Amino acid sequence: MRTAQVSRSTAETEISVSVNLDGSGTYDNQTGVGFFDHMLDQLSRHSLIDMTIRAKGDYHIDDHHTVEDTGIALGQALVQALGDKKGINRYGECHLPMDDAQVRAALDLSARPFLVWNVDLPTQKIGSFDTELVREFFQALATHGGITLHIDQIHGVNSHHIAEAAFKAVARALRTAVEVDPRKADAVPSTKGAL
């Protein structure tokens, strides 16, 4: 089983993440940030990666540290669970529509972290959630997961729909990228022989 558990403790947050790459998309995410939990649930369900996330943060300041540190820990868990990356597809992409929104995500599990973010969330808040934290999460995930990640908004006027489409598109791309191709189950998907 390709699984991992990561704990991260700082003066600002306490995070624990458990993932199973060969799961069915079951989740139990409790970060104390309601909208963010909803997005993490989508990430799990649509990637088929089982996730259990617990977070406690300095909410009296804001949600920034909790969201960012969750992205860091989740990225680290993905790296651990992928191991030597033998047999994985490595690449994934998805164009995902959600009502008015359409978002494209393309990624490479290359160990070369990079985020391209072409998304315009038209409001500063979704409920009490700061919309700028969506990018912060994906930046942390890409950096600590060793992911080259491109997220492009094609259409959209509703911030909730755009954000959710982004999480779902990344989830579907991850689902493809982490899957093992039985034709190359013992080979690293790189001419270098390592990722």
Image (cartoon, helix red, strand yellow):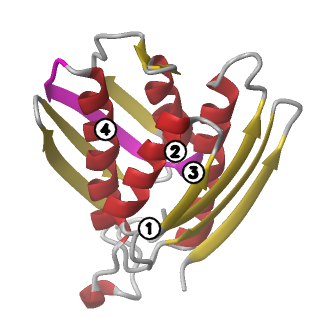
Q: Which residue is mark 1?
A: 49
Q: Residues within 10 Å of mark 1 (few under 14, many from 20)?
A: many
Question: Can you see residue 109?
Answer: no
- Residue 112 is inside the magenta segment: no
Q: CA distance from mark 2 to mark 4?
A: 11 Å
Residue at the location (76% across, 33% down)?
57
Question: Can you see residue 8?
Answer: yes
Amino acid tagged 1: Ile
Residue 50 as seen in the image, left or right of residue 182: right
Amino acid tagged 4: Glu
Percent x, y of residue 154: 12, 27
The quadrant holding residue 179 is bottom left
**Is 176 drawn above or below residue 168 in the view shown?**
below
Do the CB atoms of the residues marked 1 and 3 lie less than 8 Å apart?
A: no
Quarter that holds the N terminus: bottom right
* Disc on the earlier residue, 2 or 3: 2
Q: CA distance from mark 1 to mark 3?
A: 13 Å
Percent x, y of residue 71: 58, 42
Amino acid tagged 3: Gly
The mark found on residue 87 in the picture is: none
Which contiguous range is marked in magenta?
144-157
Percent x, y of residue 170: 32, 48
Do the CB atoms of the residues marked 4 and 1 lie less than 8 Å apart?
A: no
Q: CA distance from mark 2 to mark 3?
A: 16 Å
* Disc on the earlier residue, 1 or 3: 1
Residue at the location (54% across, 50% down)?
145
Q: CA distance from mark 3 to mark 4?
A: 19 Å
Q: Which residue is mark 2?
A: 37
Q: Which residue is mark 3?
A: 75
Q: Which residue is mark 4?
A: 164
* Disc on the earlier residue, 2 or 4: 2
Residue at the location (46% across, 70% down)?
26
